[in-house]
Image: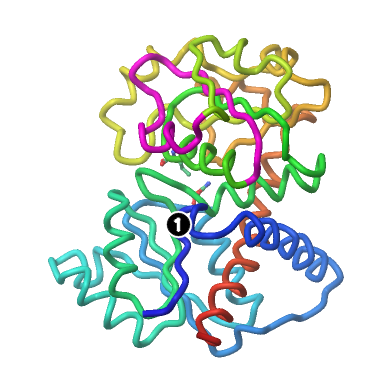
Amino acid sequence: MSARHFLSLMDCTPAELHGLVRRAIELKDLRRQGVLYEPLKGRILGMIFEKASTRTRLSFEAGMIQLGGQAIFLSPRDTQLGRGEPLSDSAIVMSRMLDAVMIRTFAHSTLTEFAAYSSVPVINGLSDDLHPCQLMADMQTFQEARGSIAGKTVAWIGDGNNMCNSYLEAAVQFDFQIRVACPAGFEPKSEFIALAGDRLQIVRDPREAVAGAHLVSTDVWASMGQEEEAQQRAELFRPYQVSRALLDQAAHDVIFLHCLPAHRGEEISHDLLDDPRSLAWDQAENRMHVQKALLEFLVMHAQQA
Ligand code: CP
Ligand code: NVA
């Protein structure tokens, strides 16, 4: 059971995370040059999706194919996972046939339990608590556009959700300050607040969070699994919409990121993704490059272990 897993940004050292971002930029460049690079020939990634996805599925699948390997999509609806086969048994069996497993799920404990029984690397493709692969793409996007994020200030506007929790981990690992503006009762989980310590400031006013910030980000007001709360949340979160005018309060060279999918007219104004300060399309593409770096790192490490 010596496989390295990537369930959270805290599973790697800051040096490893910086190395992955550097490698992602190299792999992106290789692809731009048309260089074929297939270190994972014959390798297979299993992808378990308990929630919907466009970017995560596509970026992992395309990434594996580009690296010379293949990916298999597994839906709980069509596997015994959806019929009550224990997670531990599934993990043992799957890891005898696969070289890595990516899981998008609800409870984070599904990931930790699966990983405890998996002999191959397990990657978090989003849980109710965290979205670490997305944060790696965000960090790559900032690095490419503005250089090191160390010492900079990030503003997170809206829900203290899985993305926000991962931003708090990123603040620790990539060494930046973070201001979260959210309505009372929608703060990030207390364990991540404790982890971020004095790097974190929670405020109610989005203008206070954004003042002088170098990176502004937000996310949907109702995450997957919270569909029934959507209407009630829409009322509460209305003052937290990110608009061009709000970005004008940030640093002159601020960038805006959104993990997508976006709801125009809710958490962002209709025109925000067209603003030159928004790098959301590069950010989406970078999912593929940084996850290729991650797959290379994890699968090669598992091979050597
Ligand atoms: N950002 C992100 O994870 O998108 P998907 O839900 O489309 O995978
Ligand atoms: N917070 C969102 C992120 C989607 C990529 C969700 O969990 O639905």
Name the residue: 80% across, 30% down.
Answer: 276
Q: Position of residue 304 (x, y in %)?
A: 55, 87
Disc 1 residue type?
Gly
- Any atom of ligand 1 within 8 Å of the CB at mark 1? yes
Name the residue: 31% across, 65% down.
Answer: 75
Name the residue: 45% across, 57% down.
Answer: 125
Q: Position of residue 117 (x, y in %)?
A: 28, 74
Q: Position of residue 267 (x, y in %)?
A: 52, 23
Magenta span covers which residues? 174-197
Q: Is residue 45 above or below residue 29?
A: below
Horizontal side of 275 relative to 166 (left or right) equals: right
212 and 173: which is toward the camera: 173
Q: Is residue 265 above or below residue 227?
A: above
* The magenta stretch spans residue 188: yes
Horizontal side of 182 relative to 210 (left or right) equals: left
Residue at numbered disc 1: 125
